[in-house]
Amino acid sequence: MNSSSFLLYIVFAAIGYVAHPMLLPKLVDSNFVAESSLSDSSKEKKVSKTEKDLPRPEVDDEEDIAIIPIKPEVVEQPAPTIPIPEVVINPVQDTAEDSSVTKLSEQDFINVLKNSVKAGDVNEFEFDQVLEWKLEGTDGSYQIGMITYVADTIFDEQQLEAKALVEDGKVVKWLWPTTNTEMR
């Protein structure tokens, strides 16, 4: 771009900047340009001009005009009734599934966990990293064990936990205890 083109660009920009606000409302009135192209301030000016042009009713005395507040009618409806379902309590029955589940003693349970770790069923930690083995309880047909171990992380050494699900004397899954996702 040479200097003469640049100067012409500046001159036409200045003319457009000055002439646009003056010409646009006239172009809108003569339907050459759509009204939607007006800016908000131009629309407000146009509305205020039309309001001034409208004839106002003349009132002799302003005291004759009474302002009456309108109160909406409120119709109260009865509260809907919610049917309460009947609660049926079935007595707990001993099933064949519960009696076939083998519950291990605490020492046998810990031995099952140790054997699983030694066998390499879980790759997140080794046997010598484990600090604590414990039986947490049961969940359905599973006995749940928690293992606390030390691991080197990017935040230095930390104590982490692993959850084991034992069924029929075998570890079925190793899980992360907070998310219950399977360990690899």
Image (tube, rainbow, N blue to C red):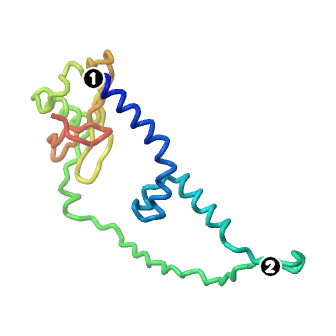
User: In the shown orientation, is residue 108 left or right of residue 37?
Assistant: left
Label 1: which secondary element: loop
> What amino acid is labelled 1 in the image?
Asn
Q: Which mark is residue 157?
A: none
- Rendered position, 51 above or below 117: below
- How many C-alpha atoms fall within 10 Å of the one at disc 1: few (<14), some, or many (≥20)? few
Residue 23 in picture, x, y percent from top left: 48, 52
Q: Quadrant of residue 46?
A: bottom right
Label 2: which secondary element: loop
Q: Which mark is residue 2?
A: 1
Q: Quadrant of residue 105?
A: top left
Residue at 23 percent of width and 65 percent of height: 95
Q: Nearer the viewer, residue 29 or 129?
A: 29
The residue that label 2 is drawn on is 68
Residue at 25 percent of width and 23 percent of height: 130
- How many C-alpha atoms fall within 10 Å of the one at disc 2: few (<14), some, or many (≥20)? few
> What amino acid is labelled 2 in the image?
Ile
Residue 164 in picture, x, y percent from top left: 23, 38
The residues tagged by marks 2 and 1 sit, at their Cα atoms, a distance apart of 72 Å
